[in-house]
Image: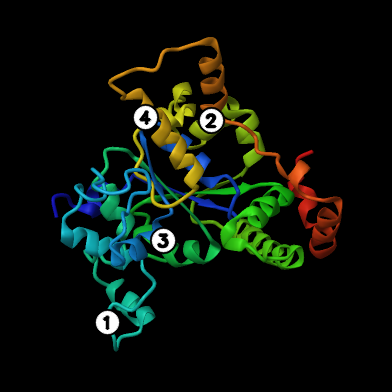
Amino acid sequence: MKADIETANMKKKVVFIMGTAHCGSTLSTMILGSHSDCFALGEVSNMPDAYRLGKPICSVCQGDCSFWDHGFSDQERSLLVKGFSERRLHRYIPLKLEKTVRSFFKRDQVFNPYSLIAAKTKENVLIDSTKTVYWLKKKLAAREFQENLLDVHLIHLIRDGRAVMNSHLRRKRDKGITVQQFGEMWAKRINNENEFFDNFSLGKKLQLRYEKFATEPEDTLKMLCQWLDLDFQPEMVNYWEYEHHTISGNAGTHALIHKYQNSDQSSEPVPQTAESERIAGKEFRIQLDQRWRSKLSSEQIAEFYEVTHDLNKAYEWN
């Protein structure tokens, strides 16, 4: 290795974003990742499957990524895949046993993947938006966190359950899901997240509302930068203007970045008119998504509350 990952990265931070699907994690990750001292990883839990299937690791570059494809050797990428995978490395050795044994070797790199990535970045803050409690429990048990080789920060990103439900119901992949099924799934996940957040003591933690981030981005970013001991950079809110190498996440957000950067690099600039500037100004800015108000019926909302009881009261944004 080119760097000693135990000494070079002791003070670097890993920010874990926890939340339900469609909670605004891609947007939050991209904005934070636009800070000069932050690097947005995206949902690194999806890296192993993309690698094994021969698909692009980076969802922004969509192939030939300067970071994931050219920043690591084949051996190093293999180490990352093993470190981020929850599959057996050896056919006859249980994964739990192998992790236990490897934890005794101080220079083992297989199950300390964040340290390997930190050694490759000039930025001091890495952001993982995988979101699930299961992932957090597995990864935070690694030596790189348990022995304080990396500082841990946890953001619990919350959003009105009605907005989350609307996103689920209109997604093709979730076609056929009922309000009751969604409500039960959402309630279970929220309860698990709240329990994990309340008991989290490994590092700093913060609860953040998607709606507040979307409606008060500058004030929210000032608070987040102070929390992360970073200088506030107001231009980071224009995340579409910056280079990103995130894994998975919201396809619409990635499409917006592509659209802006491709048009910005065009050899034949499009003539600007008052109308085109108005459209561009509306598209390339952060907007609060409240489509649930017009898309969900009163019956669907009532059924959601019947299933989840008072759980969404703390998340409502009216």
Q: Is residue 163 left or right of residue 106?
A: right
Q: Which residue has dot 4 on it?
A: 261
Task: Indicate which label's residue lies in the foreground, 2 or 3.
Answer: 3
Which amino acid lies under the numbered mark 3 shown in the image of this protein?
Answer: Ser
User: Around disc 4, counting alpha carbons within 10 Å, would you say few (fewer than 14), some (14 to 19), or many (20 or more)?
Assistant: some
Q: Is residue 173 visible?
A: yes
Where disc 4 sits, the SS reads: helix
Residue 122 vs 15, above or below: the answer is: above
In terms of sequence position, does the residue under pointer 3 or pointer 1 come before the other? Answer: 3
In terms of sequence position, does the residue under pointer 1 or pointer 4 come before the other? Answer: 1
Q: Which residue has dot 2 on it?
A: 221
Q: Residue at x 62, y 59 (%)?
A: 193
Where disc 2 sits, the SS reads: helix
User: Around disc 1, counting alpha carbons within 10 Å, would you say few (fewer than 14), some (14 to 19), or many (20 or more)?
Assistant: few
Q: Is residue 233 left or right of residue 198?
A: left
Q: CA distance from mark 4 to mark 3?
A: 27 Å
Closer-to-camera residue (12/69):
69
Where disc 3 sits, the SS reads: helix
